[in-house]
Image: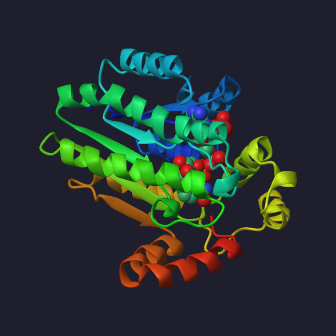
Amino acid sequence: MTPRSVLITGCSSGIGHCIAVGLHARGYRVFASVRQAKDMAELAGLGLETLVLDLRDPSSITAAVSAVLERAGGRLYALVNNGAYGQPGAVEDLTRVALREQFETNVFGTQELTNLVLPVMRAANEGRIIQLSSVLGVVCLAYRGAYSASKFALEALSDTMRLELAGSNIHVSLIEPGPITSRFRANAFEAYRRHIDKQHSAHRDYYERVEMRLGGDKPLPFTLPPDAVLKRVIQALEERKPRIRYPVTVPTYLFAALRRLLTARALDRLLARASNSGQR
Ligand SMILES: NC(=O)c1ccc[n+]([C@@H]2O[C@H](COP(=O)([O-])OP(=O)(O)OC[C@H]3O[C@@H](n4cnc5c(N)ncnc54)[C@H](OP(=O)(O)O)[C@@H]3O)[C@@H](O)[C@H]2O)c1
């Protein structure tokens, strides 16, 4: 049988890299895309088919989809929307540019890519869209407003697509990890340095502390390796009726339950404390 094709974004490191390698080993035909061409060689060395796909750039997205479809005979079974980053900072310190950049990658580019592959899936009468959301797509923490807003947007678009795709045999699943070992923190630190003006901020004291946290390598409590996410991606790909949401890590299960059980005020008190304890 011809192996099923899967396109994954953001495979240079962390979760995307792990999913790409894991699905390849499981027999899928994996198209492991990276934002920067410099990261292709390592993946190609592992036997994966690679290409460049930068979610900020519509022409890069279009070219990548065309290349995948050409190589895969016009078919694509699944898209794993993994590529993203976190823009830290108090909401009042986020410039329009910082917020726009966050959404360009995590939301607009991701949806543009999805919309290009959906007609291919519709024509094949099957497909899986797997969205890397986050515990921060379930609840909000202080100083993660831009990232949380992008993941809440991803959740809303996914929930809506599911309604609109009813009966199409195309399934949309959300994966909601808490802390996972990856380059996420290092990349968030770069985004922080790019966009946050600490000197003129009312939150300067917090930023002093955050610099220690983002710059350090102490793992957050309940951190799991990326294989924990791979396991859920495999379920979302292979279960006959994939779940709508796959929580990963204790914090996601906990916060999802507390959001249902607590009053908004009580939840706020808890989230205020968690914001300072360093949960992602
Ligand atoms: N790690 C966690 O604790 C955690 C928790 C919850 C959810 N997540 C989600 O899991 C996914 C993977 O993150 P990760 O933890 O594996 O972090 P990571 O190691 O930083 O990997 C992020 C990947 O996204 C890519 N990316 C960034 N901007 C992009 C763009 N414009 N176009 C295409 N790709 C882009 C990065 O490419 P470059 O290397 O070129 O920058 C990298 O390959 C993300 O959606 C993240 O929000 C992570």
x then y, percent, for residue 69: 36, 19
> Which color mode does the image show?
rainbow
In the image shown, does 103 or 180 lie closer to the viewer? 103
x then y, percent, for residue 164: 19, 42
Please give left or right for residue 158 compared with residue 135 in the image: left
Residue drawn 28% across the image and 59% down it: 243
Eyeballing the image, is 162 above or below 246? above
- Count the numbered circles shown: 0
Location of ligand 1 given as a quarter of the image: top right
Eyeballing the image, is 242 above or below 32? below
Residue drawn 56% across the image and 29% down it: 56
In the image shown, does 211 or 180 lie closer to the viewer? 211
**Which corner quadrant of the image does residue 222 belong to?**
bottom right
Q: Quadrant of the C terminus?
A: bottom right
Residue 1 in view (yes/no):
yes
Residue drawn 64% across the image and 80% down it: 273
